Image (cartoon, rainbow, N blue to C red):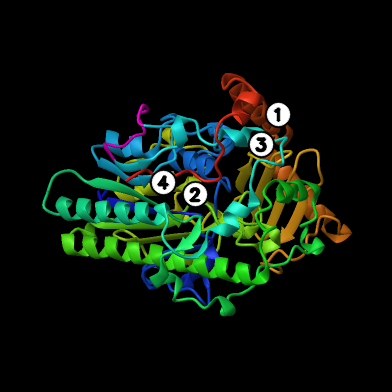
């Protein structure tokens, strides 16, 4: 197998349709769009969980959340099970992370030869308030709405530092001729706070921003689990339409900011002389609701939260477009294949498939899970073909046809004509997991963690936060 260098560029909270290459009429993302035009683009890539820490544990290990048991932002990856970073390092690659990891911390062997400017979960514990899933009062909704529009923010400062470090590392590496390398380059943006550098914010007129999709009952927005989530994380409460437009303009400006950083990194790669031997992956850990159906951030199973961009380009990659649903867990075998590291079947996670072989396996089912704050019960999403099932143990399921209704405006589980599809999708989900048993296990593990932390009152007496602080300069 031909050995290649690999760069994995991971953004945070980037919804798929915020990029020009995925059809956005207002995006200004020329670098990412050019990467897509010359690479392999996936139209239906799903996160294993619409929240940071569980998603990133699954991305590292190629395993779904119920397999890693990193259920929430308070149960981070601790270096086990083995990651693709470990596999590449063991094969002689220099593995370097630059930027956000959201693992427990440096005390664990995370599989990297070198970690530059890492962001771990706060204090090695993460967002422990999210363990209190019975609560609906742990967020101050005004804090989200107060940080929109043009301005400075520590997240922006951090990402600029990460970008500069990545450029420097690539530049210096171009002067060396030793073993191959893999870089995991991870930005915080466009994750909120939605405070945008002025020169990027000014590219977007708030008056021309599209308004969010309304919380129409026909779309299933009134489901009791979603109503509780909306109450628990009611970021939309302080907004009026003018503020929503400013926030949406800010988000698109942050996407342009990310595009600019990607341009700097790819320019450095070309100048280094290593581009012809390097494969590039661009993606995100999850999406962003951006006010759709009354939700901001993520933490639901609508497409805006669970789909992510996935673009593979550079050495060893053919151009094309893939419609088949895939998952971020598929990065594990994909990166090994791009790097030219043999992937013995017994070492590849059970559900993961190489994205370079997508399109040949028919209607493979893809899973996403959510077990964190605001969820009275687990949320399981199953995508297979054009159908999408959302299962809430103890509550009614939801069904969507994404071919005829890509915007999920009509929830179909109550239609008699779709009862057979609903039954088949539910049966398929049960071949992958036992939803009720997984739900019980998640609550048990979280109860154990609450006890380890001294109980609910002890958690409530610690400082709460709604996003991981950027490292101090």
Report if the CB atoms under discs 2 and 4 are less than 8 Å apart.
no
Q: Is residue 363 visible?
A: no
Compared across the picture, whether 147 is left or right of 259 comes to right
**Which residue bears the numbered disc 3?**
433
Crowd rating for badge 4 (residues with CA inside 10 Å; few <14, some 14–19, many 20+): some
Q: Which residues are magenta?
A: 106-115
Circle 4 SS class: loop
Pinpoint residue 299: horizontal percent, then vertical percent.
Answer: 63, 49
Residue 61 or residue 110, whichever sits in front: 110
* 266 in relation to 180, above or below: below
* 127 in relation to 281, above or below: above
Camera-side mark, 2 or 3: 2
Residue 304 or residue 311, whichever sits in front: 304
**Which residue bears the numbered disc 1?**
440
Q: Which mark is residue 328?
A: 2
Pinpoint residue 439: horizontal percent, then vertical percent.
Answer: 69, 33
Which callout, 3 or 1, points at the residue further toward the start of the chain? 3
Quarter of the rendering containing residue 302: bottom right
Pinpoint residue 372: horizontal percent, then vertical percent.
Answer: 63, 39
């Amino acid at each position: 197998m031909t050995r290649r260098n690999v760069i994995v560029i991971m953004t945070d909270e980037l919804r798929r349709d915020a990029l020009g290459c995925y059809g956005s009429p207002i995006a200004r993302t020329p670098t990412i769009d050019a990467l897509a035009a010359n690479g392999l683009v996936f139209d239906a890539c799903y996160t294993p969980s619409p929240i940071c820490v569980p998603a990133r544990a699954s991305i590292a290990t190629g395993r779904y959340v119920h397999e890693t048991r990193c259920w929430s932002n308070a149960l981070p990856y601790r270096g086990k099970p083995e990651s693709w970073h470990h596999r590449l390092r063991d094969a002689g690659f220099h593995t370097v992370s630059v930027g956000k990891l959201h693992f427990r911390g440096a005390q664990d062997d995370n599989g990297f030869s070198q970690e530059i400017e890492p962001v771990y979960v706060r204090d090695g514990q993460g967002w422990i308030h999210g363990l209190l899933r019975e609560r609906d009062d742990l967020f101050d909704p005004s804090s989200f709405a107060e940080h929109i529009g043009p301005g400075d923010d520590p997240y922006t400062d951090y990402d600029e530092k990460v970008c500069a470090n990545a450029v420097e590392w690539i530049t210096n590496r171009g002067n060396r001729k030793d073993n191959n390398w893999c870089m995991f380059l991870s930005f915080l943006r466009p994750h909120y706070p939605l405070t945008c550098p002025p020169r990027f914010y000014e590219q977007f007129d708030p008056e021309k921003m599209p308004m969010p999709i309304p919380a129409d009952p026909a779309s299933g927005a009134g489901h009791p689990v979603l109503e509780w989530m909306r109450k628990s994380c009611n970021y939309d409460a302080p907004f009026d339409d003018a503020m929503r437009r400013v926030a949406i303009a800010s988000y698109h400006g942050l996407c342009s900011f990310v595009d600019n950083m990607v341009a700097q990194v790819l320019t450095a790669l070309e100048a280094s002389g290593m581009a012809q031997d390097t494969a590039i992956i661009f993606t995100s850990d999850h999406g962003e609701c951006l006010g759709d159906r009354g939700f901001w951030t993520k933490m639901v199973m609508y497409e805006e939260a669970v789909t992510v961009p996935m673009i593979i380009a550079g050495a060893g990659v053919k151009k094309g477009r893939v419609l088949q649903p895939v998952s971020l867990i598929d990065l594990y075998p994909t990166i090994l294949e791009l790097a030219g590291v043999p992937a013995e079947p017994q070492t590849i996670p059970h559900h993961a498939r190489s994205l370079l072989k997508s399109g040949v396996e028919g209607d493979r089912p893809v899973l996403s899970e959510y077990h964190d704050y605001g969820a009275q019960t687990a949320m399981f999403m199953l995508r297979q073909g054009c159908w999408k099932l959302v299962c809430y143990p103890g509550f009614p399921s939801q069904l969507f046809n994404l071919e005829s209704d890509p915007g999920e405006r009509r929830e179909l589980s109550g239609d008699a004509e779709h009862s057979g599809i609903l039954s088949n999708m539910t049966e398929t989900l049960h071949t992958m997991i036992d939803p009720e048993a997984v739900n019980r296990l998640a609550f048990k593990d979280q109860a154990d963690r609450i006890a380890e932390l001294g109980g609910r009152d002890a958690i409530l007496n610690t400082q709460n936060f709604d996003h991981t602080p950027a490292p101090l300069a």
